[in-house]
Image (cartoon, rainbow, N blue to C red):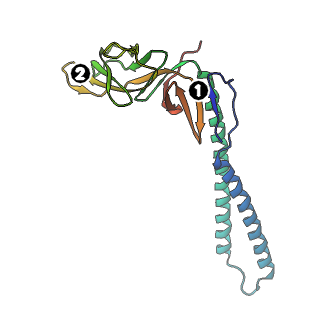
Amino acid sequence: MSGSIGAASPATTPTTTPATAGAARRDGTRLSGDFNTFLTLLTTQLRNQDPMQPMDANALTQQLVQFSTVEQQVKTNATLGQLLQLQQATQLADAAALIGRDVTIATDRLPLQDGRAQVALPAAGRAATARIEIRDAANALVRTADVRLGSGATRWAWDGVDARGRQRADGAYRLVVAGRSADGVAVPVEAQAIGRVTGARREGETLQLRLGAVTAGYETLRELPQAP
């Protein structure tokens, strides 16, 4: 079952039922029936066995242990399914609280919303500067910027204007960031996108956040907004 919330939706916590939980319940019911049948056959056999050739005790013990092990595994799977269900409901409730607020996500997709976008840059380390490239859906270069990294994490803001001075439409753009050391050597830089959460949707067991035209998994969240 899937659920979704948007900017105009109330912050409610829907109930989800993962397929794993249902499967675990069905397996548990089937195993319980099999185990009861096994005990019935076993007791019948014990009552009618030949006293001169009784059932081997080791074989009996092994069968009982095997059934007990499988039964415990099914119960464990059912418990894990319930925990997953609770975790999913909690995530969706947390996502509802983020609607309308800016978050930082680990993605190379940059959302341009209301003519603005922001990029989160790390503090200077091996990299002293970062070259930022903004590209469109066709991978054509839209805008570039060379930014000097500071002693702490910083942000670079894009006003949505391309290299020719034209205002670009809101949407999803590709973000490419390359670092450089003080002597010009290429150094990897982990840049992140900042955007306003406009909705959330559960797809199977995965929670997806919508930031305008950009969709990102809940697990890509790197920085939440400060409490008002």
Cα gap from disc 1 to disc 2, whole angstroms: 39 Å
Of callouts 1 and 2, which one flags the residue occurring earlier in the amino acid sequence? 2
Tag count in the figure?
A: 2
Residue visible at 34% across and 30% down?
139
Mark 2 is surrounded, within 10 Å at the Cα level, by few (under 14), some (14 to 19) or many (20 or more) other residues, namely some
Is 59 on the left or on the right of 46, as rendered? Answer: left
Task: Pinpoint residue 136: horizontal percent, then vertical percent.
Answer: 37, 27
Does 110 sit left or right of 10 as displayed? left
- Quarter residue 92 falls in: top right
Q: Please, which residue is most extreme toward the left here?
A: 183
206 left or right of 154?
Answer: right
Q: Quadrant of the C terminus?
A: top right
Task: Out of 115 and 34, give the one closest to the viewer.
Answer: 115
3 or 50, which lies in front? 3
Is the residue under label 2 in contact with that under label 1 (CB below 8 Å)? Answer: no
Q: Which residue is mark 1?
A: 199
Residue at 72%, 82% in the rendered image? 54
Give 203 or 164, whichever is nearer the viewer: 164
Element on which disc 1 rests: strand
Describe the element under mark 2 as helix, strand or loop.
loop
Residue 168 in percent (x, y) is at 40, 18
Q: Amino acid at mark 1?
A: Gly
Q: Which residue is mark 2?
A: 181
Residue drawn at point x = 70 percent, y = 79 percent:
55
Residue 75 is tagged as none
Q: Amino acid at mark 2?
A: Ser
> Residue 152 location, x and y as percent?
37, 14
